[in-house]
Image (cartoon, rainbow, N blue to C red):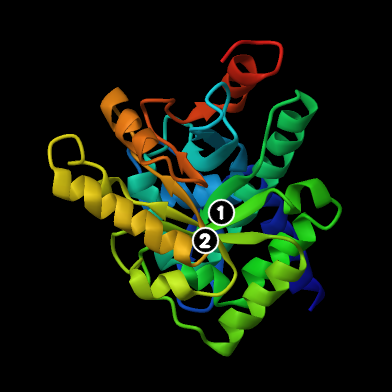
Amino acid sequence: MEELNKHTEFLTVKVKTMSVTAHINQNALLISPSAWPASPSEPLSQRLAHALFCAPEQFSVHYQPIWDLTENTRPIAYEALARWSSPCGAGPNEFIPLLALRPIWRRRFNAILIERLIMDVQRMLHQGLTVSHVSMNITYSDLAEPHFVQCLLTQTERCPDIRSRLILEITETELITHTPKFMANVLRLKNAGIALALDDFGQGYANIQSLAMPMLSIIKLDKCLIDNIEHCHTAYLALQKVIELCQTFHHKVVIEGVETVRQTQLISAMNMPNVWVQGYYYAKPLPLQEINTRYTSDNPA
């Protein structure tokens, strides 16, 4: 046993100082030291494992501003979007699907992201930014297990200003089933002051039935719902009716993918309350430093 403990201690030290290869099965993560440094030539899964467990500083968060059309001078809120900033990194469309397949990786990634978000929002508030809320994407699987919720509550336990501003966007990639575990986790979040949003309504599993999900605060409309409103009056009317439907359930609405001045004009002409907008017409996702430079009270928008 003493000899085994020595080997275990050695392995722990080596993992902290060297790259790792991660072997995943359904229930376990086995990490073994490897002599090679992570490089772009390695498979994406190996590079991702190395970043998650040996180099979490490679992950950062960019923030896309969200605007209230009735108060168009500065953003009112932000969506947090993960970036893997490394020569060995990859775009979100490449590495996020891998996380979805590996629960242990997803848990590790969420913990890293929440830690970054807490620090960044505290800096935003210190800089005097208006921050109604900051949202981050999660999956139904995250909310259907206790680990994610407990980790989030532990990380934000001493940060009431973060909890009151944090909104979890449930992505459209999975069917939402109101299981007892899911509902218990949602109730724990509500009791902690953390709200929920439904992301990408109009795509995937984000359908009309989802609007009646308890404890939703915001519905985010997918870009597909506004793509044709400049050229098709029927599309414009459909968007208007979708917004009205969301508001029937007393949800705020965020319209994603706004890219042109004409889209902004048409949405403004609806003159509907509690409708916010987000998209490249206003700003692309930006690193925290640029957010602070652009939107602090001492600088014009």
- Is there a contact, CB below 8 Å, between mark 1 and mark 2? yes
Residue at 47% from the left image edge and 74% from the top image edge: 212
Along the line of sight, which residue is nearer the eye, 30 or 107? 107
Q: Dividing the picture into quarters, in which one does residue 76 lie?
A: top right
Residue shown at 54%/42% (left/top)?
Answer: 80
Per the rendering, the mark at residue 109 is 1
Residue closer to the observer: 131 or 44: 131
Where does residue 10 sit, x and y in percent of width and height? 72, 57
Q: Which residue is mark 2?
A: 106
The residue lying at 42 percent from left, 40 percent from top is: 271
Give the quarter of the figure containing the N terminus. Answer: bottom right
Q: Is residue 129 above or below residue 20?
A: above
Q: Amino acid at mark 1?
A: Phe
Residue 94 position in % (x across, y down) = 33, 47
**Residue type beneath disc 2:** Arg
Mark 2 neighbour density, 10 Å: few (under 14) some (14–19) many (20 or more): many
